[in-house]
Image: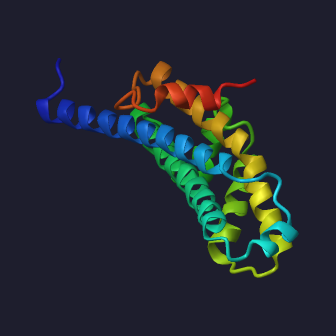
Amino acid sequence: MTQPKATHTLLVAQRAHLGDLLEAIQRCVYFLHASDASLPWPLSGETLSSRKKDASLFEALAAVNERFSKLQDTLGSAMRHSLLLSGEQADSFLKVLAIFEKLGVVISIDDWQTARSARNLAAHDYETDYQIVAEHFNTLHALQPDLYCVAARFVRYCETELHVPPSSSDFSIEFHQITRPE
């Protein structure tokens, strides 16, 4: 028995959406990496205080914040969507993380939640102590390699298990260069 045409069309659309999300993940990694590379790590409170009117420095910091958040949000959306395609049930994001921890995509739920907490602090806190601001960005900088590895493992999972690649290869070469383990 063959699937009705509408069901097949819906499946094709869902797979295409996941492919778009995978491309977005690669794009997020590429631009986060570029913003991160433009900054003088590690940051110190003294540096931020002495450069408090340096628009280009603070624009780069804002870009790191935004792009880190966007990468984690896009990964989360793509994980949820991939479970829909694989037939898995996950009514909470904690269950999504548990499934991907079992699959080896997320090494630790605690690590994911730590990264989530770090990015949420910046989204809701308007800190004026430059040492605390520097610590926040140094934390995001330190968390990036692990987030990149999750992104690489997730893209590989989608390609090998679901047979869904990124919708274009525009960022694939750079994504693999940034995310490959040393």
Give the image location of residue 39, x and y in percent. Answer: 70, 53
Q: Residue furthest left?
A: 5
The quarter in which the N terminus is drawn is top left
Residue at 33% from the left image edge and 40% from the top image edge: 17
Position of 125 with respect to 175 (left or right) is: right
Give the image location of residue 177, x and y in percent. Answer: 60, 26
Query: In the rendered image, which quarter is residue 144 located in?
Result: top right
- Residue 178 lies, with reference to residue 112, above or below; the image says above
Colouring of the image? rainbow
Query: In this figure, what is the number of numbered marks?
Result: 0
Position of 112 with respect to 172 (left or right) is: right
Position of 47 with respect to 62 (left or right) is: right
Query: Looking at this view, is 30 or 166 the one in front?
Result: 30
The quarter in which the C terminus is drawn is top right
Position of 178 with respect to 161 (left or right) is: right
Give the image location of residue 106, x and y in percent. Answer: 67, 38
Q: Can residue 110 be seen by looking at this rendering?
A: no
Residue at 49% from the left image edge and 41% from the top image edge: 25
- Residue 94 lies, with reference to residue 65, above or below; the image says above
- Residue 123 lies, with reference to residue 20, above or below; the image says below
Residue at 20% from the left image edge and 30% from the top image edge: 8
Q: Can residue 36 be seen by looking at this rendering?
A: yes
Residue at 38% from the left image edge and 38% from the top image edge: 18
